[in-house]
Image (cartoon, rainbow, N blue to C red):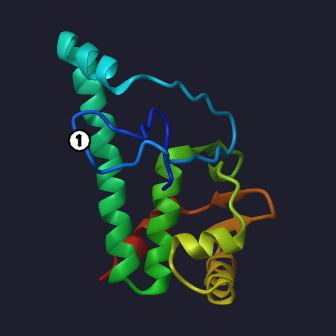
Amino acid sequence: MLLGTGAMFGDIPFHPGVFHATEQAFASGLTSVIEIDRAALENEAIAAPNFQALMLQTLSAQYQYLGRRLQWQLVSPLKKRIAFALVDLLCFTGGRCGHGHLIDIRLTQEEFAELVVAARPVVSEVLGELRHERIIEYTRSHLCLLSLDRLQMIADSP
């Protein structure tokens, strides 16, 4: 599971039995992990409506991402799945760089291929096409979206 800023994992509040308390996370980039007792978190959310709203927004964003991921994993052609994945990764970790939008998650092509449920050689070929079309640029350690509009058009295509 990819988690962005403010994301929660483990025994998520108000949603018993969905996640395991023994989940593991691997960080990419600057990360802070705060361990909070579920009951204490729920009590704080009940006592502070603004905090409760923030938690619901965070969980909603996570569920939207998971829903989109299921959509692009199960029914979309590979190029569209890759475009969806890149747009979603940008939403979680993106920032501006000198010539586009930088995705600041360190993923190997093998890991990215697992994310989009495809074989690495085929994913590499599609990434190469996107690079040739000047939609993305990448090195071993960085991926930059040169044309977010064109990538979004691929993601939104039928």
Q: Is 9 located above or below residue 117 in the figure?
A: above
The quadrant where residue 60 appears = top left
Q: Residue at coordinates 69% horizontally, 41% vertically from top-left?
A: 29
Question: Badge 1 local density, few (<14 within 10 Å), some, or many (20+)?
Answer: few
Give the labeled residue for mark 1: 15
Residue kind at label 1, given as amino acid type: His
Residue 24 placed where, x, y %?
Answer: 56, 47
With 15 as the anchor, is 133 left or right in this view?
Answer: right
Residue 39 placed where, x, y %?
Answer: 29, 22
Front-most of 97 and 80?
80
Residue 96 placed where, x, y %?
Answer: 62, 43
Q: Is 13 located above or below residue 71 in the figure?
A: above
With 73 as the anchor, is 32 left or right in this view?
Answer: right
Q: Is 111 located above or below residue 125 in the figure?
A: above
Which SS class for mark 1? Answer: loop
Q: Is 75 located above or below residue 91 in the figure?
A: below
Q: Residue at coordinates 64% horizontally, 78% vertically from top-left?
A: 127
